[in-house]
Amino acid sequence: MGNITLRNVSKVFGAHAVIPSIDLNINDGEFVVFVGPSGCGKSTLLRLIAGLEDVSDGEIVIDGKNATELPPAQRGLSMVFQSYALYPHMSVRSNIAFPLKMANEDKAAIDRKVSDAARVLNLTDYLDRKPRQLSGGQRQRVAIGRAIVRQPKAFLFDEPLSNLDAALRVNMRLEISQLHQDLKTTMVYVTHDQVEAMTMADKIVVLNRGRIEQVGSPLDLYHKPDNLFVAGFIGSPRMNFVSGAPAAAYQAHTMGIRPEHLLLSKESGTWSGTVGVAEHLGSDTFLHVNVDNIGTVTARVSGDFAVTHGDRVFLTPDAQRVHRFDDKGLAVR
Amino acid sequence: MARNVSTQRKLVITVVAWTIGILIFFPILWTFLTSFKTEAEAIASPPSLLFFEWTTENYFEVQSRSNYFRHFMNSVVVSFGSTLIGLVIAIPSAWAMAFSPTKRTKDVLMWMLSTKMMPSVGVLVPMYLLFRNTGLLDTRTGLVIVLTLINLPIIIWMLYTYFKEIPGEILEAARMDGASLAKEIIYVLTPMAIPGIASTLLLNIILAWNEAFWTLNLSAAKAAPLTAFIASYSSPEGLFYAKLSAASTMAIAPILILGWFSQKQLVRGLTFGAVK
């Protein structure tokens, strides 16, 4: 079981409330991603769950048991750190075995569990090496190995992929998702990368300035953002926001339209403009169009659409996909 | 062409480096050579560098006149003792400041270092009176206490810098992995900090071994370490260059040997934090 509930949890550093008050329920077996910009409190929230920081107020319940005052070791959670935090003086084998040794398990059981974890993570050939002799991806796998041998109630990941290069990050993303499907253990994952959040999560928690902006499945957040912040944060390239007359046409203070929901034409359309920068990705092209009386609008078109800098184009928002927001930035549905 | 210039540059740098090296080393070499001369040859003008009658009589005479081994033992007790006690106090202090700093930690560190900026002679009289009144004058205990106190800021600073380099996340990982504070210290902290503790230990033994101001002023006969042993040969009754050199050679030899074998640790300790 790995059910985690936060009730009115807050964290104050000095006079600064990093997390004013949060209520959240994480179900057993769920892959929950905390996402938000730097300094939004997502790592602090994870550390509160881990027990590495004390809560200022509220309670943390793990599997029905109040864990607010429990030290990290007694919460039954494992954590994978951004810097891997491997023990540099120990071999890979000793690193993975460390939590079992701390739990006073017998040697035979430790050996068996370490070899199982090593096999799952493709580390069998590296068991006798020191962390410094491994690549970044291998180190991250050792950190994951150290987390899984304990069979924790839940895994906590604190931006585990941000030290890896882009290609390796995609691989590890898949490996972690695969691991979640195999183990079916609760995972709480912190990232500032909305692509990681979208691709891995069952449930995304969008945080901003210590507050939860919205909780929902990736597609929920994509299709039905509650406010301007979530609308702008989820989706890449980010949603275009337009205020004034064009928005008023949709009875909104601000209208939002995703780049992929703009129809592009060289002949006619609702808005006209000039192509500024065209980013060709092959399959897609991102066009940054300077629309008359509106400003820069990003559009996503098929890679086959032949257009270059300075071309005159027309854009038409797909009326069904327009997001409407009131003057407080909240969604109007 | 470029290669030629660089070879020339290398040559110049090599010559300059050797010259500086020899200049620095020369007094020690001169002392060593003089210790094998007779007193007459030691003050002869012009002096002879190598072509003199080699003799070891100075060493025997120095040993017979003032018991070298007693001074040696005093030096060992005072330098090792003060360093070990210093470490026992400094390790928890440095841990606390490195891993749970407060708003005032930097100020405390600066204050500790500032005590090293005051000239020692400024507190000589009160210290002397304190030592006299407490019966610590000319005792090993007294010297251990004073050397512990004067080297403590350096020990704490070195360890603090070293501990700061240990990432906090590794300690947190140990905590997540179920380690109690004791196990965290035994299995994770100490093995990672041993190189730092070792170089701090070595450097402070050398500093304490060479410390002359307090050891000369607060000891007389019983507790006098090797510094006092050397000083006793530059007495007003006449200069004994050859014997003074023999005494100096005997005094610096042990620490030179220790330093030679622990060069790697020492250099690491002295440059720690400068390069990652």
Image (spheres, helix red, strand yellow):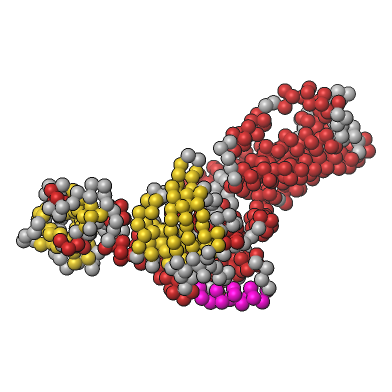
Span colored in magenta = A107-122
**Which residue reaches farthest left?**
A267
- At x 9%, y 57%, the residue is A270
Left or right side of B194 for B130: right
A113 magenta-colored? yes
**Image coordinates for residue A41, horizontal then vertical, percent:** 43, 51
Front position in the image: A313 or A165: A313
Q: Quadrant of residue A99?
A: bottom right
**Which residue reaches farthest right?**
B64
State the count of labels.
0
Q: Quadrant of residue B181?
A: bottom right
**Image coordinates for residue B20, horizontal then vertical, percent:** 62, 38
Front position in the image: B63 or B195: B195
Dominant secondary structure, magenta: helix
**Image coordinates for residue B189, horizontal then vertical, percent:** 64, 54
Would you place residue B224 above or below residue A282 in this image? above
- At x 82%, y 24%, the residue is B129
Front position in the image: A166 or A42: A42
- At x 67%, y 58%, the residue is B183
**Image coordinates for residue A10, horizontal then vertical, percent:** 47, 49
Q: Is residue A280 visible?
A: yes
- At x 64%, y 46%, the residue is B95
Would you place residue B92 above or below residue B37 in this image? below
Q: Quadrant of residue A177?
A: bottom left
Q: Is residue B61 visible?
A: no
Front position in the image: A6 or B157: A6
A40 magenta-colored? no
Left or right side of B172 for B186: right
